[in-house]
């Protein structure tokens, strides 16, 4: 039995911040878990260092379910993004260790491959419709079969998903939260035009997706869903905030455009009503923010009963460790739908060498034992943490809005 003898939290910032948990056992086996919560990183680092690590020492690393229950029920204060991200990191690291001890990639421990590889979608962002389509055409040539399109909104200085001139898009872009201005009316005019132009240029053999990023009211989202129906989207994502899950019933009543939600969810309880009432088509909860592989499998099992498929979050604020875990999960789960892929920078990949690979619009976790990701701790130590916040949004009259 591998006994946990050490656990340490590594904070590194190769271009952006990542928090990683490294667990070591008495036989020398190590496991990695991602604990990154964008814009709130140090709260999870402290939760782990100050409150979780002391409870891990001396435990049997093979008892993944028991450790999960111990950290979830044992905290008394259940759920929430900080708690569930910390539990996720421990869970991922323990699956990594179990795989290494068994000499098998984690997906083999989860039942083996249920498909050859995982369909992924990439991002095409542009200031104008023409720029966005040019980027999408390039991604299609790179082999992507599913592309998310976001474009600038005429009359608004910046828009979610669209990078500043000549820079990579990273959502956490300020030492303090940057303020953006939002207009639903302007946005709702441009999006159908974007997708009309996209179908014209890209044809019908590529899946198209769009992220509303929680900015519409239910009836506005219903209108957008209807307006986009002719372009047969794969999904619209986070059409309205999901705290009130019944809001999705209203959208559903009006449109057949598929709905995806859940990148900000952290437990099965956030998704239960949406899934059981078939108010969504894709669940976007991720291994890193929703309690790890153990808990995400439980969410997927519930979703499978209702033909809701997975479409896990995969922005660059999830580290390569989370990306690997997502691919082991995605390869093995019966109701996999699609995985988001926003490639990491070369700087990040150098800190986290990994076995997963992209070919022909799909990804595979690779066959290295465990998760197949390591961390170059010396290189990690050269990238100091830098405070970074997500922006906030205001309406044109100054009212604070969802970003
Ligand atoms: O769909 C997505 O990828 C997102 O909505 C993210 O870019 C999100 O804005 C970030 O993960 C926030 O940290
Ligand atoms: Mg999103």
Image (cartoon, grey):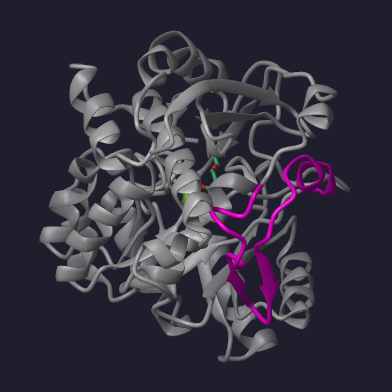
Q: Based on the picture, tell me whether residue 369 belongs to the magenta stretch.
A: yes
Q: Is residue 359 above or below residue 303?
A: below
Which residue is found at the position 23% from the left and 53% from the top?
298
In which image quadrant can residue 94 be found?
top left
Which residue is found at the position 45% from the left and 70% from the top?
331
Q: Is residue 193 left or right of residue 218?
A: right
For residue 193, say whether it is visible. no
For residue 151, say whether it is visible. yes
Farthest top residue in view:
50
Number of marks in picture = 0
Q: Is residue 215 left or right of residue 23?
A: left
Q: Is residue 156 above or below residue 20?
A: below
Q: Residue 401's x, y, as percent? A: 44, 31
Q: Is residue 250 left or right of residue 292?
A: left
Q: Is residue 57 above or below residue 102?
A: above
Query: Which is nearer the eye, 319 or 5?
Result: 5
Query: Which is nearer the eye, 121 or 258?
Result: 121
Q: Based on the picture, tell me whether residue 167 belongs to the magenta stretch.
A: no
In which image quadrant can residue 80 be found?
top left
Q: Residue 179's x, y, as percent? A: 62, 25
Query: Which is nearer the eye, 330 or 101?
Result: 101
Q: Residue 127's x, y, as percent? A: 75, 55
Specify the quadrant that holds the N terminus: top left
Magenta-highlighted residues? 345-373
Which residue is found at the position 66% from the left and 23% from the top?
11
Q: Is residue 106 left or right of residue 359?
A: left
Which residue is found at the position 76% from the left and 29% from the top?
377
Query: Which is nearer the eye, 68 or 249?
Result: 68
């Amino acid at each position: 039995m591998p006994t946990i003898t050490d656990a340490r939290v590594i904070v590194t910032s190769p271009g952006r911040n990542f928090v990683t948990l490294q667990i070591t056992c008495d036989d020398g086996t190590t496991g990695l878990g991602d604990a990154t919560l964008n814009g709130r990183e140090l709260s999870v680092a402290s939760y782990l260092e100050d409150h979780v690590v002391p409870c891990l020492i001396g435990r049997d690393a093979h008892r993944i379910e028991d450790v999960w229950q111990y950290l979830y029920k044992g905290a008394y204060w259940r759920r929430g993004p900080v708690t569930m991200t910390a539990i996720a990191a421990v869970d991922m690291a323990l699956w990594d260790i179990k795989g290494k001890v068994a000499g098998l990639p984690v997906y083999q421990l989860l039942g083996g491959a249920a498909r050859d590889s995982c369909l992924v979608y990439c991002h095409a962002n542009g200031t104008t419709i023409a720029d966005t389509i040019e980027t999408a055409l390039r991604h299609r040539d790179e082999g992507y079969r599913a592309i998310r399109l976001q474009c600038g909104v005429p009359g608004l200085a910046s828009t979610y998903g669209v990078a500043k001139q000549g820079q990579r898009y990273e959502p956490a872009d300020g030492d303090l939260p940057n303020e953006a201005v939002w207009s639903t009316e302007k946005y709702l005019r441009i999006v159908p035009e974007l997708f009309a132009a996209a179908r014209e240029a890209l044809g019908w053999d590529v899946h198209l997706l769009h992220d509303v990023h929680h900015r519409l009211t239910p009836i506005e989202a219903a209108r957008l869903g209807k307006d986009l129906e002719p372009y047969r989207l794969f999904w619209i994502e986070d059409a309205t905030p999901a705290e009130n899950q019944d809001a999705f019933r209203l959208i559903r009543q009006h449109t057949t455009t598929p709905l995806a939600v859940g990148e900000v969810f952290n437990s099965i309880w956030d998704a239960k009503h949406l899934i059981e009432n078939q108010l969504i088509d894709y669940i976007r909860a991720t291994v890193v923010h929703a309690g790890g592989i153990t808990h995400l499998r439980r969410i997927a099992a519930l979703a499978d009963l209702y033909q809701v498929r997975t479409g896990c979050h995969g922005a660059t604020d999830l580290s390569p460790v989370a990306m690997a875990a997502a691919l082991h999960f995605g390869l093995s789960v019966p109701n996999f739908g699609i995985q988001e892929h926003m490639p990491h920078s070369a700087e990040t990949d150098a800190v986290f060498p990994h076995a997963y690979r992209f070919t022909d619009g799909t990804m595979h976790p690779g066959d290295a034992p465990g998760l197949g990701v390591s961390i170059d701790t010396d290189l990690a130590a050269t990238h100091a943490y830098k405070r970074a916040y997500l922006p906030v949004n205001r309406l044109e009259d100054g009212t604070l809005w969802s970003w």
